[in-house]
């Protein structure tokens, strides 16, 4: 990441002055110390990105000071400088933890090389902290399917990916919006730069600005170190704003400024930081409706909705179910070290007729569960996944056929004169107690009852239902749209 604060520890006034002026001309904040004691005092006052450290100092050996620097919690990179160097001495310093080694006298070009190497190294370290797993692991790539809708989507991605235009990916939960975003990144000219994702739905209002823009040390309680935000980490690369509709109104104006000007300040900071970032945003909500309700800024919506891409739900593309199911089956068979070549026709028909309210994510979870449940005691001759391997909700209940009772024989009735007949009346309506109840209705009742039992507390309700807070929030939004009263709403 861009360097900002540099400390020069050298007892020669000429080096202090010349190196300090050279660094300040490159818009860097420079502090100078003439001894180890002064250098330690500067490190206690503020955090530095880079330290130029002389080997020979009036109050001690620079190598000993180097050992203390590399043990700091917020460790700067250290470049050792000396006028009497040797290969053995340089190797010793590098083994202790020095980043580079310079011999006096050095030219401005030597310093520029060191600064470039330092920035590249710091960027690599910072970005890798967010990339704890490979984004494109073998076998976990994007599966499009064979439906006409997905073929059109592939063509659309191929057209827009090479550009730098902002893309807005919409679709229901579980349709694969993030996978589409990764494919846009993979086919772009920024594919060799960082791909940084921020889930806006899980960040509280107090933390989202720090996550997006970073913060300075002391900006708020607990900010003990300076931290780069996601925009800074994504410099030259791509930033995915996942579920951007969940960004609180108080932060939308700052996000709009970054999208327009490509610049921002860290929380608690005054320095303007410029970034070159390609933006991809996703949402499972209708943002145009949120704009009409005053929940989302219209100017931010239009800034994000430059190139909209909609991912259709799985129920609208049944031709893709077999392709996706077989891909997931092979993936989880390899993961669990099984040999499952496919599905029986009965199991495949059941998968293709199901509505899949959870879309591709639900299909993926269903196949993995079926692989695990069908693992124990499966003979080689029964290697295919069958209907009993699927969850019980997919299987029709086996019940004996209902037999209609034989009506009793009519009793003889004496003839009655027509004028004595009572006026005809409609039979009373009897409620149907055996009417089927939909799965969505059962789900709605369970959520609302649990929410009522917890006094409207969303967090406790989500934990007890074993669902995410975002899923609960989306469900409650659907119920409000249907005019249903939500416990805890005011």
Image: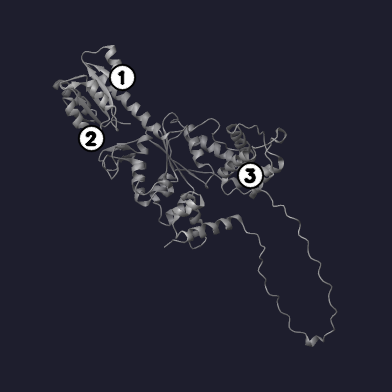
Q: Nearer the viewer, residue 398 or 273?
A: 398
Which residue is under mark 1? 94
- Picture quarter with the N terminus: top left
Is 392 left or right of 257, judged from the image as shown? right
Q: In this orientation, does residue 154 appear?
A: yes
**Upstream in the sequence, badge 3 or badge 2?**
2
Q: Nearer the viewer, residue 435 or 236?
A: 435
Is 80 left or right of 326, judged from the image as shown? left
Q: CA distance from mark 2 to mark 1?
A: 25 Å
Q: Secondary structure at mark 1?
A: helix
The image quarter containing residue 132 is top left
Q: Position of residue 66 (x, y in %)?
A: 25, 24
Q: Which mark is residue 384?
A: none
Q: Residues within 10 Å of mark 1 (few under 14, many from 20)?
A: some
Which residue is under mark 3? 318
Q: Residues within 10 Å of mark 2 (few under 14, many from 20)?
A: few
Colour mapping = one colour
Q: Nearer the viewer, residue 210 or 225?
A: 225
- Which-is-in-front pick, marks 3 and 2? 2
Is 261 left or right of 314, judged from the image as shown? left
313 over 379 or under it: above or below: below
**Upstream in the sequence, badge 1 or badge 3?**
1
Which residue is under mark 2? 46
């Amino acid at each position: 990441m861009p360097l900002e604060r540099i400390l020069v520890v050298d007892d020669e006034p000429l080096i202090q002055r010349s190196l300090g002026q050279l660094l300040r001309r490159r818009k860097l904040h420079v502090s100078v110390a003439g001894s180890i004691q002064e250098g330690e005092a500067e490190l206690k006052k503020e955090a530095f990105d880079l330290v130029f450290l002389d080997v020979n100092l009036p109050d001690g050996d620079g190598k000993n000071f180097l050992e203390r620097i590399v043990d700091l919690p917020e460790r700067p990179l250290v470049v050792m400088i000396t006028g009497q160097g040797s290969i053995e001495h340089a190797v010793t310093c590098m083994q202790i933890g020095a980043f580079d080694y310079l011999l006096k006298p050095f030219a401005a070009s030597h310093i520029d090389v060191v600064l470039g190497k330092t920035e590249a190294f710091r960027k690599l370290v910072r970005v890798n902290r967010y990339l704890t797993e490979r984004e494109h692991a073998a076998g976990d790539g994007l599966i499009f399917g064979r439906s006409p809708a997905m073929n059109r989507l592939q063509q659309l991605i191929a057209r827009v990916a090479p550009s730098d235009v902002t893309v807005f990916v919409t679709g229901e939960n579980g349709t694969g919006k993030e996978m589409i975003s990764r494919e846009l990144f993979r086919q772009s000219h920024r594919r060799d730069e960082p791909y940084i994702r921020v889930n806006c739905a899980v960040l509280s209002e107090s933390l989202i600005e720090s996550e997006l823009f970073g913060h300075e040390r002391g900006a708020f309680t607990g900010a003990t170190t300076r931290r780069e935000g996601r925009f800074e980490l994504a410099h030259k690369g791509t930033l995915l704003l996942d579920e951007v509709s969940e960004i609180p109104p108080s932060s939308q104006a700052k996000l709009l400024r970054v999208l327009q000007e490509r610049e921002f300040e860290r929380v608690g900071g005054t320095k303007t930081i410029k970034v070159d970032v390609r933006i991809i945003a996703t949402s499972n909500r209708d943002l145009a409706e949120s704009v009409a309700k005053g929940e989302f800024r219209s100017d931010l919506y239009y800034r994000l909705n430059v190139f909209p891409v909609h991912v259709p739900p799985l129920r609208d593309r049944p031709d893709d179910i077999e392709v996706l199911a077989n891909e997931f089956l092979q993936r989880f068979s390899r993961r669990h070290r099984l040999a499952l070549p496919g599905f029986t026709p009965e199991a495949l028909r059941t998968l293709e007729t199901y509505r899949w309210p959870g879309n591709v994510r639900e299909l993926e979870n269903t196949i993995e569960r079926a692989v695990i449940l069908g693992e124990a005691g499966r003979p080689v001759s029964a290697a295919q996944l069958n209907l009993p391997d699927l969850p019980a909700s997919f299987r029709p209940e086996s019940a004996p056929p209902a037999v209609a009772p034989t009506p009793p024989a009519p009793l003889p009735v004496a003839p009655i004169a027509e004028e004595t007949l009572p006026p005809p009346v409609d039979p009373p309506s009897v409620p149907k107690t055996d009417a089927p109840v939909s799965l969505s209705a059962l789900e709605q009742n369970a959520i609302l009852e649990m929410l009522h039992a917890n006094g409207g507390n969303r967090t406790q309700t989500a934990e007890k239902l074993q669902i995410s807070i975002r899923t609960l929030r989306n469900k409650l939004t659907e119920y409000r749209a249907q005019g249903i009263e939500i416990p805890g709403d005011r």
